[in-house]
Image: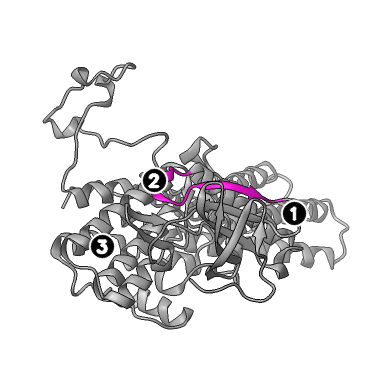
């Protein structure tokens, strides 16, 4: 603990501040004394106190922590979010961070390492079951309390029913512990926390990260083209860590699957056999693999996410809005429909620049206007589909079908040229086929994996 600095408050509410525990980009954490004894007080930086975005994030951190089971994080005791300097008073967890512990005492070994792995996997399970993605799980944010590890700092966490679309230039997190999709994708979900968990376990066991250190571009290149270094991990931990460090988010285990792997168990029960009263003597174990299902802890599980559905579906939100994986069929389909849409708009420019006197020319101009309107709608669909929204793909498919219907309805007024028939018939078939394949691949679920 460091002493208070000039300009630091010596009191906030009912709490007397006695020293500094740490400082981050969002605020400073003080050690305080109050009615509940020793507490940790997080105070928003003065330079951010008038920033509505920073204040909103601070409020969101409080609401996020309150959603999560208290055993795996520092419980909130009080807060003042309306004053000039918002602050949150939470439980003080005596003990160093995992990063500090490894640097001072060396890597964790044997039982201590496995206890850490199980404890943090349990915490992630509780966090995801509460409908929250941490997004910044790393050694400094794991406190080694006397009663087990606690996960802290939910300043950039997101609720699963309100996942942020992170735009280019707004990367949030620590590169050495960020999953590949956090560098390139618009939507991140629970799998990014599992990747960070794997990197954190490598640090705990060896004192280094699986892909080394470096700037954003160096780290991304290693993650895409290299293999994680898990040398030094015991076999029973190396296998689940490697699974969590998969490049493909869909190939990583969920938090509860990871926990069962670490425990070496995989309970198999028939959920339909559990009565409402939940009596233990009514639970029926089965040996038929075709009837086995995985248990969940509580609420709606964050497992087997449909990649064409909103992550909000995990917490009761509506489905059908992304994220959609960027596959080769999706890329080819969007490229082809982009080309056709641009040709449609170019044809209007050509016709509008000429003299329109005949009825056939008038019909051709009207048809080009309709095609151009459909092309504009298609371009919005292309943008949405590329950003991961399945609804964008469906928009393109519907617009292509409408375009074909318009073309067929006007054949009598605007007879097509022989060379354009191929474009009019084959292009929508190819586009719809490729996009349908993209939707199918986007919906592919990760196959069940057995416990290691």
Q: Residue at x 57, y 52 (%)?
A: 89
Q: Which colouring convention does the figure follow?
A: one colour
Q: Pointer 2: what residue?
A: 71
Q: Is residue 373 left or right of residue 20?
A: right
Nearest the viewer among 191 and 73 is 73
Residue 443 is at least partly visible in this image: yes
Residue density around tag 1, few if under 14, some if 14–19, many if 20 or more, within 10 Å = few
Q: Please state if 254 lies on the left or on the right of 127 as rendered.
A: left
Judge the density around disc 3: few (<14), some (14-19), many (≥20) Cα neighbours within 10 Å.
many
Magenta residue span: 68-81
Distance from label 1 to label 3 (Cα)?
A: 44 Å
Residue at which label 1 appears: 83
Q: From what the image shows, is residue 231 above or below residue 305? A: below
Indicate the position of residue 177 as horizontal and vertical percent values: 40, 69
Q: Where does residue 278 sit, x and y in percent of width and height? A: 29, 20
The structure residue drawn at horizontal position 62% and vertical position 75%, both measured from the top left corner, is 5
Q: Residue at x 54, y 37 (%)?
A: 317
Residue 138 sits above or below residue 62 on the image? below
Give the secondary structure at mark 2: helix
Numbered label attached to residue 241 = 3
Please state the horizontal and vertical placement of residue 358, each as a whole percent of the image.
85, 55
Query: Which tag, 1 or 3, sits closer to the chain's start?
Result: 1
The alpha-carbon separation of the residues under discs 2 and 1 comes to 29 Å
Indicate whether residue 415 is drawn in magenta.
no
Give the residue displayed 54% in from the left and 44% down from the top: 161
């Amino acid at each position: 603990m460091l002493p208070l600095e000039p300009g630091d408050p010596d009191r906030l509410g009912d709490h007397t501040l006695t020293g500094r525990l740490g400082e981050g980009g969002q605020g400073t954490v003080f050690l305080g004394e109050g009615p509940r004894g020793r507490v940790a007080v997080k105070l928003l930086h003065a330079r951010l106190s008038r920033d509505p975005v920073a204040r909103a994030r601070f409020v969101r951190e409080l609401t996020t922590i309150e959603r999560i089971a208290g055993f795996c994080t520092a419980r909130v005791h009080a807060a003042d979010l309306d004053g000039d300097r918002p602050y949150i008073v939470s439980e003080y967890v005596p003990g160093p961070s995992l990063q500090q512990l490894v640097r001072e005492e060396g890597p964790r070994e044997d039982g201590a390492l496995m206890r850490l792995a199980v404890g943090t996997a349990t915490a992630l399970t509780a966090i995801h079951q509460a409908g929250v993605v941490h997004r910044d799980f790393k050694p400094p944010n794991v406190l080694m309390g006397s009663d087990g590890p606690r996960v802290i700092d939910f300043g950039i966490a997101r609720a699963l029913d309100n996942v942020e679309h992170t735009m280019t230039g707004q990367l949030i997190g620590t590169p050495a512990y960020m999953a590949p999709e956090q560098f390139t994708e618009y939507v991140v979900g629970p799998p990014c926390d599992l990747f960070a968990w794997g990197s954190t376990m490598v640090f705990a066991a060896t004192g280094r990260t699986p892909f080394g250190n470096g700037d954003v571009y160096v780290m991304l290149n290693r993650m895409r083209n290299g293999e994680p270094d898990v040398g030094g991990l015991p076999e029973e931990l190396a296998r689940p860590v490697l699974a969590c460090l998969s490049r493909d988010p869909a190939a990583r285990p969920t938090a509860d699957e990871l926990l069962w792997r670490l425990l070496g168990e995989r309970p198999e029960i028939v959920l339909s056999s559990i009565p409402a009263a939940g009596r233990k003597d009514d639970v029926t174990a089965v040996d038929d693999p075709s009837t086995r299902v995985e248990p969940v802890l509580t609420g709606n599980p964050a497992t087997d996410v449909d990649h064409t559905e909103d992550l909000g579906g995990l917490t009761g939100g509506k489905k059908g809005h992304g994220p959609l994986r960027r596959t080769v069929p999706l890329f080819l389909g969007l490229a082809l429909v982009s080309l056709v849409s641009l040709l449609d708009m170019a044809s209007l420019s050509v016709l509008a620049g000429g003299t329109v006197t005949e009825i056939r020319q008038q019909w051709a101009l009207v048809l080009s206007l309709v095609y151009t309107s459909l092309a504009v709608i298609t371009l919005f669909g292309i943008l949405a589909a590329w950003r991961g929204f399945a609804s964008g793909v469906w928009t393109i498919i519907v617009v292509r079908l409408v375009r074909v219907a318009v073309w067929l309805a006007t054949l009598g007024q605007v007879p097509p040229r022989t060379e354009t028939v191929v474009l009019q018939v084959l292009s929508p078939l190819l586009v719809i086929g490729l996009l349908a394949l993209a939707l199918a691949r986007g919906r592919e679920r990760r196959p069940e994996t057995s416990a290691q």
